[in-house]
Image (cartoon, grey):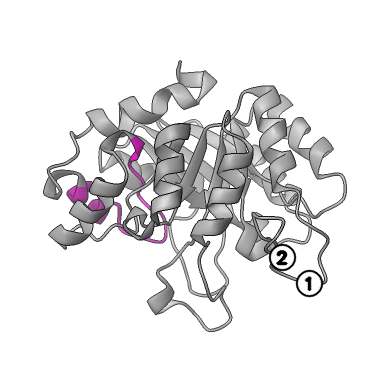
Amino acid sequence: MLIDINSYCGHWPFRNVSENSLIGLSELALDNGITHMVVANINGFFYKDANTANIELYEQMKEYSGEMHFLPLAIVNPTYPEWENDAIKMLELGFCGFELAPRYHGYSLAPEMLYDEYMPKHRAREVLSLAEKYDVPVRICASVENFRGRRRMDTPDNLYNDELFALLSANRNVNVMITGFNPAVIDDKLCRLIKERGKTYFDITQVEGFMINNVKTAMAKVDAKYFCFGSGLPFQYAETNVVKLFFSKSFSHPGIPSENIKNVFKELR
């Protein structure tokens, strides 16, 4: 079993992306030994009503009959009216958890750090409370692409340590996956919280696999048990992140990536 916690279907407005359907993703993933993919429809980052994208993913899931085991996440925008009813409906339809995209939906994870002064205070904590009630995980997208190569119209920054600290300390019971975030930049306060809290997982897509110091720094701050495999498909080459598992010598392929995360999902327990 090799679980990929960072993959998407859908379209990306800042460059042409191929193989971005469930069929395309599964073909690329199976070639790299991936057996399970935690997937969301990235169209929900850009639709006014994110749940429209969840319905699109649901329709794709009904039509898919391949070998890949998909674990679909419903993208939730807590600033949108009736988000809670939509989120519950997606769980009833078989979705395995929720995804937050604070930078694309224009809010901060910390109430005291308003991302947009015209927005009401965010309700990200309410999403975690709902996830706790239904015993499902939450994935938080810190970034999709490396900031050095982003389109100027894309989001200019990643999540801040203080935002993650505020949210994770407010709810310590929900399993949270943070993708597109390099643990090497975690400050001491957040590091201590993660070790106390547990139930916090990072993928390896932003860890520089070919820079030993970067890997060692990340591993020194966050224990290997909090690292999981993420392909970054379809935005990255899956092969690159598979190589990281071997190159860092801190992971056991495929043991670490699957053992760490499989109990997060009710479907895999």
**How busy is the neighbourhood of tag 1: few (under 14 within 10 Å), some, or many (20 plus)?**
few
The quarter of the picture where residue 18 lies is bottom left
| Residue furthest out toward the top | 269
The answer to whether residue 219 is seen in the rendering is yes
Residue 171 image point, x, y percent: 62, 36
Question: Across the whole image, how many numbered discs are drawn on residues?
Answer: 2
List the single residue furthest toward the right.
81
**Which stretch is magenta?**
226-244
Q: Residues within 10 Å of mark 2 (few under 14, many from 20)?
A: some
- What residue is shown with label 1? 117
User: Percent from the top left, x then y, of residue 147?
Assistant: 43, 73
Is residue 235 found inside the magenta-colored segment of the image?
A: yes
**Position of residue 238 measured from the top left corner of the image (x, y, whole percent):** 30, 52
| Quarter of the view holding residue 94 | top right
Q: Check the picture and name the quadrant holding the N terminus.
A: top left
Image quarter in which the C terminus is found? top left
Pointer 1 and pointer 2: residues touching (CB < 8 Å)? yes
Q: Is residue 190 above or below residue 198?
A: below
Asked if residue 95 is among those painted magenta in the image, a careful observer would answer no
The x and y percentages for residue 205 are 34, 55
What residue do we see at 57% from left, 73% from top? Answer: 155
Q: Which residue is mark 2?
A: 114
- In the image, taking residue 91 as reference, residue 179 lies left or right, namely left
